[in-house]
Amino acid sequence: MDGKLVTMALAALPYVGFGALILYCRMNTALDLNNQMEITPLMRKALHVHFWYFIACPIMIEVFLDAVPGLNYIVGTMPPATTNGGHFLQCLAAENFFVTSVSLGFILNQSSVPRWALMTPFAQLAWNLKNHLSWFFIP
């Protein structure tokens, strides 16, 4: 199968999954997206882990990308950022981590939130699952 077609199919999975989740929540009044959900101690711990990780990532991506010990073992050798495209992707990745950390910070400062507010961490997990599938298909 063509690489771009596989990539497009994999990128569509989180969108389809979230579309189905939204439809399911709309059809089930007990799962209304506007209902308040208590932030439980376990949920708070998981959100804290993500929050602090996402706080560190923009700095690591924009300032210390070449100095992160062991990064080449985790994601492979980083190409030199000598193009506008490379710089654009670096800035975009850092921005996404920053925006997510701000969202998680607001959630962590609440005792309860509307169910829709928790879609940010769920979306991050859905995209990570897509990434794991794509790594499986990369030769």
Image (cartoon, rainbow, N blue to C red):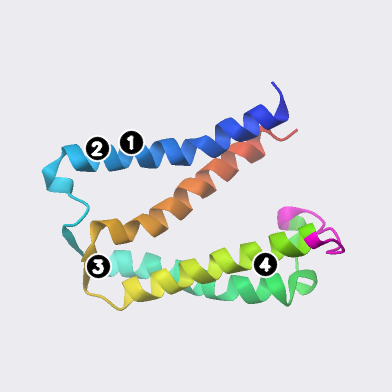
Residue corresponding to mark 2: 24
Whole-angstrom CA distance, mark 4 to mark 1, is 31 Å
- Camera-near label (4 vs 2) is 4
| Mark 3 or 4, closer to the camera | 4
Mark 1, residue position: 20
Amino acid found under the numbered disc labelled 1:
Ala
Residue that numbered label 4 is attached to: 91
* Residue 128 falls within the magenta-colored stretch: no
Helix or strand or loop: what does disc 3 sit on? loop
Q: Quadrant of residue 133?
A: top right
The answer to whether marks 3 and 4 mark residues whose Cβ atoms lie closer than 8 Å is: no
Q: Residue at x 30, y 78 (%)?
A: 109
Q: x and y percent of residue 71 in the render?
A: 74, 63
Question: Which is more foreground, mark 1 or mark 3?
Answer: 1
Q: Which residue is mark 3?
A: 39
The residue carrying pointer 3 sits among few (fewer than 14), some (14 to 19) or many (20 or more) residues within 10 Å by Cα, namely some
Q: Main secondary structure of the magenta part?
A: loop
Dot 1 falls on a residue whose secondary structure is: helix
Please tell me which of labels 3 and 2 falls first in the chain: 2
Counting from the top left corner in percent of width and height, residue 127 is at: 51, 48
SS of the residue at dot 2? helix
* Image-based side of 83 in relation to 96, left or right: right
Pointer 1 or 3: first along the chain:
1
Q: Secondary structure at mark 4?
A: helix
User: What's the amino acid at mark 4?
Assistant: Cys
Q: Residues within 10 Å of mark 2 (few under 14, many from 20)?
A: few
State which region is magenta: 74-84
Residues at badges 1 and 2 in contact (C-beta under 8 Å)?
A: yes
Q: Is 76 within the magenta?
A: yes
Give the Cα separation between the discs numbered 3 and 2. Answer: 22 Å
